[in-house]
Structure formats: C-alpha cells, structure tokens
Amino acid sequence: MLQAARAEEPEGNALLPHSSADLPIWWGPELPDGHRSGDLLVVAAVARCLELPQEEAAQWLLEQQHPLRFLLCKQLSSTASKSAWVYLAVDRVLGRSIVLKVLDTAAAKEARLLAAVAHPNVVLVHDAGVFEGRTYIVLQWCEGRTLTDYARTHAWADVLARCIEAGRGLAWCHALGIVHGDVKPSNVLIHDERALLADFGLAGRPREFGAIAGTLAYMPPERDHGIWLPAGDVFAFARTTMVALELSASRPGHRARLPRSILDILTRALADEPDERPTMAGVLEVLESVHHSLHQSLPRLARARTDWGGIAFAAAVVGVITMSLASGYRMHELIGPGLAAATVRVDPSGSRTVRVDPSGSRTVSNEPDIEAAIELIQRGSALAAWEEFQQAEQHGDVKLSRALELARLAVEAAEDAPISTCDEVSRVAQLISLQVVTLAVQRGDLEGEDRARRLQRRAEAAALKSPDNPPSRPR
C-alpha cells in the first residue's frame, strides 16, 4: 500500500515543484487514521506554503487522499555531498508548516543535540525519526530571512541586536559543553525580529582529533588540524558579526561608522590562536554594552525586554534533562558525565517532590526557594542546586542578592573541585552564573550584572582544568 501511494503522483502537478530527484512530493511514515482527513490547520499550512487561497488548498488536499505524513513543498538547500536536504514542508500530524531536514543516514545526533540545547535563540526541534534508512528532523519554520538578508535592509544597531541574540544561543551551547562548528550568517535565521541559531549538523563535544569540516570562510585556523573547541565558534561568530555589521553599515544612503569597541573585540576574537580569543561571554559583554548605550533613553523595563526578549532558560533546560532521563538517553554525552546523576520524581500523593542526587536522597517542598539551592550547593549537590534554582525562579521572585550568593558558591565549588569532578561542577557553575546574568539584566541592576559576569568568567576559567577541555595543539 505504501509503495502504491508513493507512485500516485498527482496529475497536473504544476502547483508543486519536485523537491529532489531522490524524494517524492509525498514522503515519510504513514499517518495515523485520525490525521488523514486534513483539518483546518493542515489546510492553512498548505495554503501558506503553496501560496494558494484556502479554498483551493483544501480542494487540492482532499483530492490527494495520500496516507503519508509530509508534503514537501520546496527544497531550500542541500549539502554539496548530497548527504542532507532541507525542505519547506507541511507536517500533517502537527498541522503546521515546518522545515524538514532529511539526512542520508539513520543517525539522530543532531536532533538530540538540538533538543538538549532548548534555548530561545536556537531553532526548535519538534520531532525526529527514521524512515527508509534516512533520518528526518522536524524543525521550526522561520518565516523570516537569514542574517545576511536582514543586514542588507536594517540599521546596524538592529543587526547588532540580532547578532547578540545568536551569541546568547551559542554561549548557552558552550555552557552545555557543545561546539556548534558551523556558525555563519546563513545559519542565523531571523523569525519575528529574533535571531535563531540553526544547523547543528556538525555540532558535538569539544575534541582534539575531529574531522576537518565546516564552511571555509568562517572556519577557525585550528580546524585545519581537526581541533574543535568553543573558541572556534567564537572565531566564526566574530566573522559572522563583522560581515553582518559591515553589510548594514555600508548600505547605500545609510553609511555609518561602527564603534571602535566593537571592532576591537571582534578583532581579538579573530586571533589565530584559540587561547588568545575571548570567550563568548567576553564578546557578548562588549557587544551588549554598546547595545545598552544605544538604548539609554528607553525606560528600564523596555530596555530589559529589548535586550533579552523574555529569555526563560530554566523550564526548557530542566524539562529536557528530565525528559531525557526518563527516556534513558545518556545526557552525559551532551553535558558531561555526572550531570545525569540526579532525577526528580513526585510521590504518589503528589504533595512532595523527592530529589535523588549523587550524595543521597533529599525531600524538598513543592515550593522550592533559593535558600534550598544554596544549601544544596554547600552540601556538594551541584546539579540538584541548579535544578532547585530553576524551579525557584518559576515559583516566585528570587532575590538577586541571594542568586549572586548561589553563583559565588557554585563558582568556588568549581574552582576547588578535583579534576575528576571538575567537568560536572564547572558546567553547573557556568549555567548558574549565566542564569544570574540574565536575572540581573532583566531587572536593570548594573552592579549585579557586573558581579554576575565576573563570576561567569571565573566559572569558565575553572572549566579549563577539566579533562574534557584539552588545550589546543601547536600548529
């Protein structure tokens, strides 16, 4: 039945350009019975993707009677080796327009990495699976454009804001121990005036003997020797930002001179030697300082909203970790051994939450607070403290002074940790300090932000002694 359905290409198919020679227009696993009728959401998605009136889209969809999940509307890109294709498509299960990435392998590493990152400035992954020996990843569809397109039509201050947003997503990846590996303007998408980092096809853990891969114009020099470090992403981000800002600043009729501080920090980030480059946090600190100065006349609340766009790291990351643990996926492959050692479960009465961490069991109220997180970090339960902090932010107003105290204790724990446990403790310290930076900026507390950033830099320095972060080799 499946093969027969695939052979039934609709007659007079001028409405739909063929996606590629390898995949038909209708592709993917069979639909569950409840999704075959084509509801209003599917009709709306088809109309939008094919640029048809709703009535025509509904009639066309009704005539197809296809039992397959994906309607491939347009091929957006493909790799030079023809090992991956990206399509604008309609997902009839989700009832929405999506981007469908099809890989010529049955590996799901990219989808898992994207799901683990779970950040407002990283493209969302909705689903993934394997069909006919190929992995497919169902991604958020960004109706906007790439950073290159955006830069050609917007003022440099707006372009700077989008670059900062992409940098936040990249900094979050680094805090989780993930190297993106292919940062470039075409992998930064603009959706609803917000930048989203995309294409994690080359992403993975830092490594010293990796493939020589990436986009040549944005590859760091050490990549020629197979060295994959977060510093390489810093190099690629700096070049991406420089290209975007120059495109904007040199627009005909809109020529502008970029601030010296921006050029200086990007030049430092483009150093040949990885250890001579600032961290992503250091680059963002300078870029955000310039961006803040451009918005000093705005009310404090509006400025905070402009700068951070309502970022909520907590629920997304904790939710992904809990979900991944429940599914048996080994999160230590993504964020370091030991981080998957804590679990959360609710007892049958639903009145108490039991946390199990490497140091033993602890019963905590369903209304967590920052003091409990501080107590946990003092007891040596770093992951449980981070998790408690995230939940405390969701349940009520966390005092910035106490959040800074938690970050200080986490950083000191990372600095004092032996090599064997440094990877776990330092990553938690980075995540907590990064979250406290967010909290300080949202509240417009410049002194608190400065303290949080200093703690963040100390956490990053502590991570350098981890065996998972080897020094770069001389070239």
Image: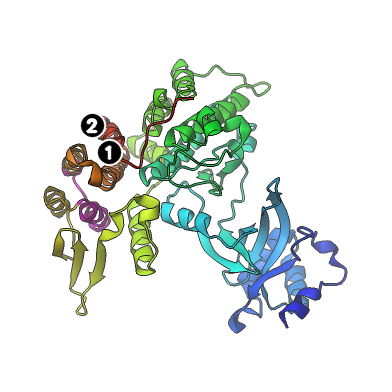
Q: Position of residue 399 (x, y in %)?
A: 18, 45
Q: Is residue 139 above or below residue 40?
A: above
Q: Which mark is residue 110?
A: none
Residue 79 % position (x, y): 68, 47
Q: Is residue 389 in the magenta section?
A: yes
> Quadrant of the rendered structure where residue 116 is?
bottom left
- The stretch in magenta equals 382-403
* Pick the front one: 359 or 301: 359
Residue at position x 65%, y 65% from top?
90
Residue name at image x 52 percent, y 45 percent: 196
Query: Quick one: SS at disc 2?
Result: helix
Residue where numbered disc 1 is placed: 440
How far apart are the two marked residues, 1 and 2, measured between alpha carbons? 9 Å
Label 2 near label 1: C-beta < 8 Å?
A: yes
Q: Position of residue 277 (x, y in %)?
A: 42, 25
Residue at 54%, 38% (x, y): give it.
183
From what the image shows, is residue 413 above or below residue 151? below
Which mark, residue 451? 2
**Crowding near the residue tagged with mark 2, few <14, some 14–19, many ≥20 C-alpha atoms within 10 Å:** some
Residue 39, x across and y down, in percent: 63, 75
Most frequent secondary structure within the magenta stretch:
helix
Q: On the picture, is 411 further left or further right than 240?
A: left
| Of 5 and 166, the residue lying toward us | 5
**Looking at the picture, which amino acid does disc 1 mark?**
Ala
Q: How is the image coloured?
A: rainbow
